[in-house]
Amino acid sequence: MLKEEPTRKVMLLLKKFIIFKIFLSLMLTLPLSPTLAKDSAIEAKGIELRVGLSTSARSASFSSDGGLIIICGGRKIYKDGKIELTLEGSSIRIDNLKVSEKLTILPASRGLLSYNSKPYRGRFEIIPNSRGLTIVNVVNVEEYLYGVLGAEIPSSWPMEALKAQAVVSRTYAIANLGKHRANGFDLCASVHCQGYGGVSSEDPKLKRAVDETRGEILTYRGEIAKVFYHSDSGGFTLSAKSAWGEDLPYLKSLKEDFYQETSSPYSSWKLEIPSTKLMELLNDIGLDVGPPKDILITKKDEFGFRALSLKIVGSKGAVEIPATRFRQLIGFTTLRSTAFTISKKEPLERVRKANQRETQNEAPDIEKPKKRRNVNVRELLAKGLSYDEIILILAEAYGIIERDVAPKDEVSKEIIFPSKPDERVFIFEGRGWGHGVGMSQWGAKLMAERGKSYTQILEFYFTGTRIEKKR
Ligand SMILES: [Zn+2]
């Protein structure tokens, strides 16, 4: 997750419109991905990754202690200290120069390069277009991982769990080279791909986890593995087949026998949501069944743990939707997993309780309403923007895109939307956080605490894969 913790509001906003698209795009693109590195790419002397930090910057500043070198159209310009770039039409303005082609900026000496005062390793490429400047940090994959781990996992966790994360993040990065090719880079720096904060998110212990696994990736029958991870499985992981229909032998449903010892704050949670709120959310995606009367789990995974499909019965009809779609609708940080039971409080009972409360003069135990802001993704789509472009616009605007990994901060075990006494309230009691496919970070932590090595952790979650060391 990100260093700068986003507001709940922003997370709510973003998750609703985007996350499922991300999930879908993952599902859709991964099986076809022709860019999954073959040995040649991996064996290249250190893979370089192009990480997109912005696609629509209006301006950007760069500095380096030992000065900068700007390469533009075969020309090399040396600059002392700091430079400011601004967008002018679809060109870049630097001092009295106006250029309409790609710029490369690198430190003149061995120092780091700062972009908008934040230090980064490697070099930068700035590509102008009418929407703004695309800012790309070109960095070696190992150095990229230094800046990823700090955004994805707490450094206080046991070393073997950090090393497992390093291998999974490396595998993910290499397997997804070119994911944002249409934007002019490989991976974005938000959790849509993997959170990346440059040098400011580095930590000595996390660096050691990267260094001690240098070049190691997971492969299956010689091909790079498609890896996924999530925060907390709740005790059972979900197979890729159940999640999105792709039968991958190393992404099976697993039971974590050790789970009862977990200290995860997400091991159990509760969400209360009133039917009118639910109706509003359904209406937003064009589903009108009236106020929901019932929500039934119509399909579960092989452990009977996660819901795969739900039927929502309203006064005007019924609709069946995939549980992941439902989760996206409610919000990935609000409905934390699809491992839940559903119960409800009927209106009459609620009125009675509310009256009791009134006589006892107790304040109702509810959180402040969470305001939703409308982002018209449809409008952006109509303008011809791709999902990836929209994701990036939102990521820049709000500082975060949630992937299915829980924030590091402690979060409330209960989310209760305000409701009126005369409306029906649905209660979801659940376990875990995330889609449940691949490695559970909290599970990896627990395995490491019980003395398992990172190779054992990876063997457990990605059974049948091999760790191969490539340079
Ligand atoms: Zn991305």
Image (cartoon, grey):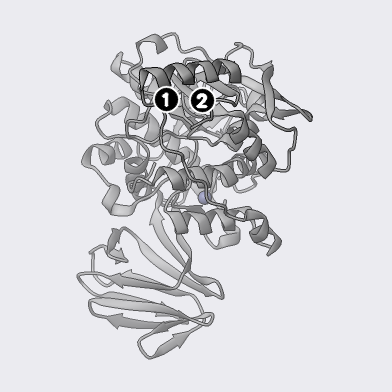
Q: CA distance from mark 1 to mark 2?
A: 8 Å
- Label 2 residue SS: strand
Up-down relation of residue 367 to residue 51 (above or below):
above
Give the amino acid type for the residue marked by disc 2 in the picture. Answer: Glu
Q: Residue at x 23, y 64 (%)?
A: 111
Circle 1 SS class: strand
The quarter of the picture where residue 166 lies is top left
The location of residue 441, given as percent across then percent down, is 40, 27
Q: To which residue does mark 2 refer? A: 272
Residue that lies at the very extreme toward the bottom in this rendered image:
96
User: In terms of depth relative to the viewer, which is nearer, 448 or 167?
Assistant: 448
> Residue 202: horizontal and vertical position, in percent?
27, 46
Q: Is residue 391 left or right of residue 457?
A: right
Under mark 1, the amino acid is Glu
Dots 1 and 2: beta carbons under 8 Å?
yes
Does any portion of residue 245 appear in the rendered image?
Answer: no
In the image, residue 73 lies at what x, y percent? 47, 82
Tell me if 299 is positioned left or right of 273 in this view.
Answer: right
Residue 324: percent from the left, percent from the top? 62, 31
Q: Which residue is mark 1?
A: 414
Query: As drawn, is 285 to the left or to the right of 127?
Result: right
**Position of the C terminus by quadrant:** top left
Image point (41%, 60%), residue name? 138
- In terms of image quadrants, where is residue 344? top right
Decide which of 247, 297 is in the foreground and name it.
Answer: 297
